[in-house]
Image: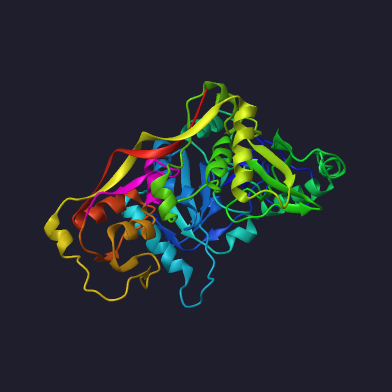
Amino acid sequence: MLWWIVGQINNCQAQDKTKYPKVGDTIEDHLFTDLGNYPKKSVKISDFRGRWLVLDFWGRGCGSCVASFPKMDSLKRKFEGRAEVMFVAMYEDLNPEKPEKPITKDFFERRRENYDLSFINAYDSTVQKKYDIRGVPAIFLIDPDGVIRAKMVSINQNQLAAFMDGETPVYARSISATEDRQMVEVRKKTPKRIFPDFTQLLSDSAVLSMSYLVNARDEFFDVYRFGLYKNSKPERQGKIGIATCGGASLDELYRLAYTGYESWDIQDDSLYRSLNQAVIFDSKKLDSLHFKVNADGSIDGLFTYRQFLPFDLTTEEQRRAIFLKDLNQTFNVSSKIEQREVDCFRVTVKDKQKVLKLKTRGGNSSHGYAKNSIDRVYRNLSVWEIVRWAGIQSGLKSIGRGGKPVIVDDTQLPYKVDLDFNADPSDWKAVLNFMRSKGFDIISGKTLMNCIVVYD
């Protein structure tokens, strides 16, 4: 998703002769022949002339695309008669034995039923090349004359209303594949800012170590990460070892300094349950330094840290300890790990008799996909293991609770279970309904966890 953020330059067009859809162009027509939520068997883009058209390209693996379904359906209902919303599912058959199209259809139909979605959904494997789509989410906003008014990452009701009123609001601009390649070539030809190179100084003098921390905006595209991460070694130049973390936020810097990882998820079992990923900043002086995307698309709050130390005289733990000390001294703060009360979601037992029916029949512990490539099959696993492998935390995005929420297993079952997980884990409503049907529940609450705390 970060790549899309970098491309947020409102109403700015590259001056080139390469043909790809640009704002201000009349969109090339296309006939869609596989449709859902539409009374006819086929429809062309030109059939929507006289109304605004939000053409939303998506894929089954795009979590933010799927999470936007309810919001986009509300937008469609809000502007009924003045604007139409059509999602276009793009897919690629990578496995001949498991065609992607029917899997995507099943995936969407479950969402449509759960959320009573009313917008049109088309299935088409050719539009990505035709419209030069680099990646999803990607939205083309087309006016009643068939002219592309914006190429966006997302759209809300206020933005659509502004376009209808003849205004051009700030929006996150998506980038075509051809446009992306041209940007890469421009970056290759653009001289980079030269950062201090202390290797010669260190090798020729009595200075044994040196480090610096800089704003990373100018080298965002050159993200180097080595020497500070778990089981990684610094780059060696002579007797000097250079450890680097580039293009990282404050949260990532502190997580890396304490753990050797800048992020983790529920699959990293021991770390997930021992340390909350959300860094707590009790210091107000750092408020202006957090990661943010400005209205003009520029980015603040990314940093690059480099550390020069004798290669053979420092360990991984020592390098991170120096890194942490540098962070605290640079920002004039202190930091520690302490227990704090944090928000969580608790998996509990609601109906003991229903849950008892899931008690395992034994055999090898296993997990995998069912034949439809959507449902999961779990055998002889604990509830916590199923929660981890099912990835149900991804569904929290659909209710506005994205990021890395804390999920706690409070079932305390003395046995393992067999479970056919017949719910889309990215759909929180479906997850809740399924878990409750099996005798479980998931409720919001609080829990005590170790947290990284940064304070004055």
Judge whether residue 107 can be spotted in this image. yes
Residue 120: say if magenta: no
Up-down: is 370 above or below 436? below
Q: Position of residue 410 (x, y in %)?
A: 25, 49
Closer-to-camera residue (45/268): 268
Closer-to-camera residue (291/233): 233
- How are the residues colored? rainbow
Closer-to-camera residue (338/395): 338
Q: Point out the residue furthest to the left here.
A: 353
Judge whether residue 119 can be spotted in this image. no
Magenta stretch bounds: 393-412
Up-down: is 419 above or below 116? below
Q: Residue at x 70, y 49 (%)?
A: 313
Q: Is residue 326 left or right of residue 385?
A: right
Q: Residue at x 38, y 35 (%)?
A: 339
Residue 49 quadrant: top right
Up-down: is 168 above or below 379? above
Q: Position of residue 292 (x, y in %)?
A: 58, 32
Q: Is residue 89 left or right of residue 362?
A: right
Q: How many marks?
A: 0
Q: Position of residue 158 (x, y in %)?
A: 49, 30
Up-down: is 344 above or below 267? above
Q: Residue at x 72, y 49 (%)?
A: 179
Closer-to-camera residue (27/7): 7
Residue 11 quadrant: top right
Q: Position of residue 231 (x, y in %)?
A: 59, 56
